[in-house]
Amino acid sequence: MKKLFGVIGNPIGHSISPQMHNDLFAYYGIDAHYHPFLVEKGRLSEAIKGLKSLGAAGFNVTVPFKTEIIPLLDWVDPLAQEIGAVNTVLIKEGNLLGYNTDGPGFLKSLEEELPLPERPSILIIGAGGAARAIFFTLEKTRPAAIDICNRSVEKAKSLSGEAKTGVPSRGLTLAEAEDRINEYDLIVQTTTVGMYPNIGKIPLDPGGINTPFSAADIIYNPSETEFLKQCKLRGGSTVNGIGMFVYQGALAFELWTGIKPDSGRMRSTVLNQLGGATC
Ligand code: ATR
C-alpha cells in the first residue's frame, strides 16, 4: 500500500516540500505520497491523531506548530529539545519520534557552499526560531565565538545565555554588532527582513566590513536579498537559503526512507518551483 507522508502547517499552500519529496519518491521507485495538510490552529492534537490512525509514516511540521507539537510526541531528539522545535516526525511502530533538521540542514549548506576558516567567529542576526536552530547546531561545531544580535536585544542575550558547549557568546544590539562587524568570519542572517515582498530592506548594514568574510541568508525568495547584495559589494562570499531548505528536506527524507537523496536533483526541483513563484 502507498505510504503516506506530508507537512502540517498554517498557512501551507505555498510549501514546495510536496514537489521536492514526491519527485524523490518517484525517482527512487518508492510507493509513497507527500501531501500538504492545512491544520487549524487549536486542532494540532486531533490532526496528529488522525495522521497516526491513517497509518502515515512520517511528516514535516512548519509554522506555527514546531514548538507546540513537542509535548504531543513520544520521543524528541536531544538537539530538537535544545532548539525547542521539531520540524520532522518519524512514525515508527506507532510511536511519534521528533527531530529538527533545520539546523543540521543549514550546517550542511555551509559546509558545501561557503569557504570558512577552521574555527570561525560567527555573528547571527535574529533570535527567533530559525536563529535557535542554527545557534544550537553551530555551537556544537566548536567555533571561536557565536554572537547574536537582534532588534529586541533581550532575546539575543537570553539565547546567548543558553549556550551549552561553553562557546563564547554575547547578545548584542544591531548597532553594537555593526560596530564590531570586522570581528566576524561568518555572518548569518535569520530574520524575515528582506523577504518577498519586502525586498530592499536590510536588518544590519555590513558597509563597515573591510576584512575577508562569508555571509549566509536563510531567505530564498528573493534568491539574493539586499543584505547578501551588500555583503557581495564588500567582497564577501555569500550563500542564500535554498541550500538550507534542500538539506533539511534531504535529512528528513533519509530519516523516513534510509536513503541519502540526490541533493542536486532536489535543488533543481526547488529552483523550478521558485521560477514560477513571486520573486
Ligand atoms: P523565525 O521562526 O522565522 O525565526 P520569528 O521567530 O518570528 O521567525 O523571528 C523573527 C526574527 O526576525 C526575530 O529575530 C525578529 O526580531 P524581534 O525578536 O525583535 O522581533 C526579526 N525581525 C522581524 N522583523 C524585523 C524588523 N523589521 N527589523 C529587525 N528584525 C526583525
Image: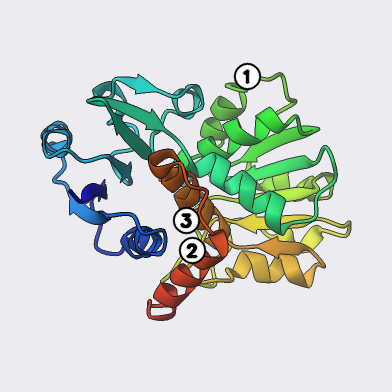
Residue shown at the point (60%, 34%) measured from the top left: 137
Sequence-first tag of 1 and 3: 1
Residue type, mark 2 in image? Met
Disc 2 or 3, which lies upstream in sequence?
3
In front: 182, or 215?
215
Which residue is under mark 3? 192
Residue 195 spot, x, y in % from top left? 47, 64
Front residue (pair 191, 38):
38
Q: Is residue 240 visible?
A: yes
Q: Earlier in the sequence, mark 1 or mark 2?
A: 1
2 or 3: mark nearer the eye = 2
Camera-near label (1 vs 2) is 2
Q: Are marks 2 and 3 in contact (CB under 8 Å)?
A: no
- The Cα atoms of the two marked residues, 1 and 3, are separated by 26 Å
Residue position marked by numbered label 2 in the rendering? 266
Which numbered circle lies on residue 164?
Answer: 1
